[in-house]
Image (cartoon, rainbow, N blue to C red):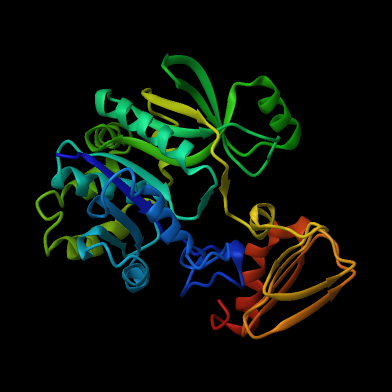
Amino acid sequence: MNHTYVAIMAGGVGSRFWPGSREARPKQFLDMLGVDKSLLRLTFERFLPICPASHIFIVTNAAYRDLILEQIPEISDNQILCEPSRNNTAPCVAWTAFKLAALDPEANFVIAPSDHIVLKEQAFLEKIQTALEYSAANDALLTLGIQPSRPDTGYGYIQMENEVASGIFKVKRFAEKPDLPTAHEFVSSGEYLWNAGIFIWRASSILHAYQTLAPDIFSILEKGRSVYNTAEEQAFINSAYPTTPNISVDFAIMEKAKNVYTLPAEFGWSDLGTWASLHAEYPKDENGNALQGNVIALDTHDTLVRIPEGKIAVIKDLHNYIIVDTPDALLIYPKSKEQEVKQVTALVKEKSGDKHL
């Protein structure tokens, strides 16, 4: 029996991608790259060489169930984990582990976000396979670490210790997003990797970690052992899940556990978290502009323009900007201040309620 599984986390709102990403249809369900496939669909297809579609599960908010089935018709209802509340990643990882352990006590799985870009898919798959082989044979919690290409302040970092197997290193510590001087120190030391938030472990290993390090989450979700993968599962989750603490798996487990390992990797990775990250990955013209749609850019440089089908846009004398046009909202914002976009949505809500969110 193939004991390998994949869980894709697809429940976020993607508020930093407003007004393209909305609560009703967040960025993971959008064709952000202009390839006629959503980020979720690209992620699902990326993992098909690892395991069959029947072993790929999607963890999402209950509001997105129909979107999941629309974009990934290959999966069954039981492969969609519908969260009734947004409680960060620690509860969703625990639920996934309980569900897979009930399905297959030897389950060995990858859990990964739905909105990452991977340009070198074969290199990515090789690293995932190496990690799965190690976790199948060892009581280990593994994370992929990205070789940093620059001193970026937007990512968390992983500090490596000694190599325990070919290409696999013990993790010394996790570091939060640093300031720029600290990021320079991290990168120049050669000891640090970017934290990609892609994890690999056996269901039994991660559940043991929860029982030891996050017993509150474990005890709440452990009560559903008899109903996982049955018709009663969702009713139990609807009642129990909102009572779990709102905490990330990094804080709840990874920063406390002693059996954490990392695989340094380089596979053309990007955490597609902001409009500027999309600009960085999207094909650009000779002036560094990433133009999506029918756009005429005059004396414009290093700018992202996203225009809906049926419109034409003429842009002149803009430098380092984000322009995103939708049927009911328009964003024109300096790319250097893109981290403010998430806060902008609060102003939009104050001005016009939820209708533009």
Q: Is residue 173 visible?
A: yes
Quadrant of the rendered image containing residue 156 = top right
Residue in the picture at 68% in, 39% down:
152
Whole-percent x, y for residue 323 in the image: 73, 70
Q: Is residue 144 left or right of residue 58?
A: right
Q: Residue furthest left?
A: 226
- Residue 341 image position (x, y, % from top left): 67, 64
Q: Nearer the viewer, residue 245 or 282?
A: 282
State which quarter of the image contains the N terminus: top left
Residue 325 percent location from the top left of the image: 67, 77
Quadrant for the C terminus, please: bottom right
Residue 294 sits in quarter: bottom right
Residue 342, above or below 9: below
- Specify whether 183 is left or right of 171: right
Image coords of residue 259 (percent x, y): 36, 23
Q: Nearer the viewer, residue 157 or 306?
A: 306
Q: Residue at x 33, y 51 (%)?
A: 92
